[in-house]
C-alpha cells in the first residue's frame, strides 16, 4: 500500500490555505437568506520528477465540530507522463521547455555509475531535444498561439535548462554555446519580421481610414492589400464615432 508522504501532506494543507484565501476574497452574499457562499478555485499540483509513490491526487479530510467530514482533493499532474506533443495539444505551452528536465534522472544514473559513454550520448540527446522544443515554440509563435515575449521566455528556459544539465552532469564544452546560437538564430529574425509586418499593417489601416469617404470597400482592399472584412470593420467603427 502506498501512503502520502509527509511533504505531500504539508503541500495539500498549503493548497487548502491558498484556496480558502482566494475563495474568501470572492465570497458572495445571498440577499434572500443572508448566507455567504465561498467558491474554491480549481487547483492542480505538478510533480516533475518520476516517483511511483505519487498518487493521482492530494487529499485532506476536514473534520468540523459536529463530526461532519469533507474530503478536500487536489488533482495531481505527473509531468513525466506527458510528451511535448501532449502539452501542445492541451495548450500547456509554458511547460514545454521542461521536457529537458526529464533527462535528469537518466543523467543521475549515468553519473553515479561514472558511465562516460552514456553521459556523452545524453549530451547529443539533450542538444537534439533542445532544438526540437525550440522549433516547436517557433511554430507556436508563427501560428499566433503565443506572443513574441512568450516565445522569448520559452527559448530562455530552454537555454537555462541546458545550462543546468550541462554544468551538473554533461560537462560538454560546446553544448551551451551551440544551443544559445540556435535559439538566438530562431528568435531574432522572427521577432524582427513580425514587428515589421505589424508596423506595415498599422500603416495600411491608417491609410484605409483616410480613404473611407473617397473610395468603395473593394477598391480600398485592392489598393492596400487589406481584407474586405477589415475595411467593413473600419467603416463600421467610423460610423459609430
Image: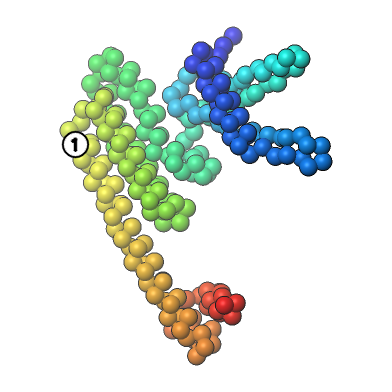
Q: Position of residue 102 (x, y in %)?
A: 39, 29
Q: Which residue is mark 1?
A: 174
Circle 1 — which element?
Answer: loop
Is residue 206 at least partly visible in the picture? yes
* Circle count: 1
At x 54%, y 16%, the residue is: 9
> Relative to residue 236, is residue 54 depicted above or below?
above
Q: Residues within 10 Å of mark 1 (few under 14, many from 20)?
A: few
Measured as percent of width and height from the top left, residue 72 is found at 65, 23
Quarter of the image for the C terminus: give it: bottom right
Q: At which x and y percent is residue 182?
A: 26, 46
Q: Quadrant of the N terminus?
A: top right
Q: Dividing the picture into quarters, in which one does residue 115 lie?
A: top left
Furthest residue in direction right, as rendered: 32
Residue 193's place in the image compared with 120, above or below, is below
Q: Residue at x 60, y 77 (%)?
A: 240
Amino acid at each position: 500500500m502506498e501512503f502520502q508522504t509527509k511533504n505531500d501532506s504539508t503541500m495539500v494543507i498549503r493548497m487548502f490555505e491558498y484556496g480558502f484565501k482566494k475563495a474568501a476574497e470572492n465570497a458572495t452574499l445571498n440577499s434572500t437568506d443572508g448566507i455567504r457562499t465561498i467558491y474554491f478555485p480549481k487547483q492542480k499540483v505538478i510533480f516533475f520528477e518520476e516517483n511511483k509513490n505519487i498518487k493521482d491526487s492530494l487529499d485532506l479530510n476536514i473534520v468540523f465540530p459536529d463530526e461532519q467530514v469533507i474530503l478536500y482533493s487536489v488533482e495531481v499532474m505527473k509531468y513525466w507522463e506527458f510528451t511535448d506533443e501532449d502539452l501542445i495539444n492541451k495548450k500547456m505551452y509554458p511547460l514545454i521547455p521542461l521536457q529537458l528536465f526529464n533527462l535528469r534522472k537518466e543523467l543521475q544514473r549515468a553519473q553515479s555509475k561514472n558511465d562516460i559513454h552514456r553521459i556523452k550520448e545524453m549530451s547529443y540527446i539533450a542538444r537534439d531535444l533542445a532544438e526540437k522544443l525550440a522549433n516547436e515554440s517557433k511554430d507556436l509563435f508563427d501560428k499566433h498561439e503565443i506572443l513574441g515575449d512568450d516565445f522569448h521566455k520559452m527559448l530562455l528556459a530552454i537555454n537555462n535548462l541546458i545550462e543546468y544539465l550541462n554544468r551538473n552532469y554533461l560537462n560538454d564544452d560546446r553544448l551551451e554555446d551551440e544551443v544559445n546560437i540556435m535559439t538566438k538564430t530562431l528568435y531574432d529574425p522572427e521577432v524582427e519580421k513580425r514587428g515589421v509586418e505589424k508596423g506595415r499593417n498599422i500603416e495600411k489601416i491608417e491609410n484605409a481610414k483616410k480613404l473611407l469617404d473617397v473610395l468603395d470597400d473593394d477598391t480600398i482592399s485592392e489598393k492596400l492589400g487589406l481584407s474586405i472584412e477589415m475595411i467593413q470593420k473600419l467603416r463600421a467603427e467610423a460610423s459609430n464615432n
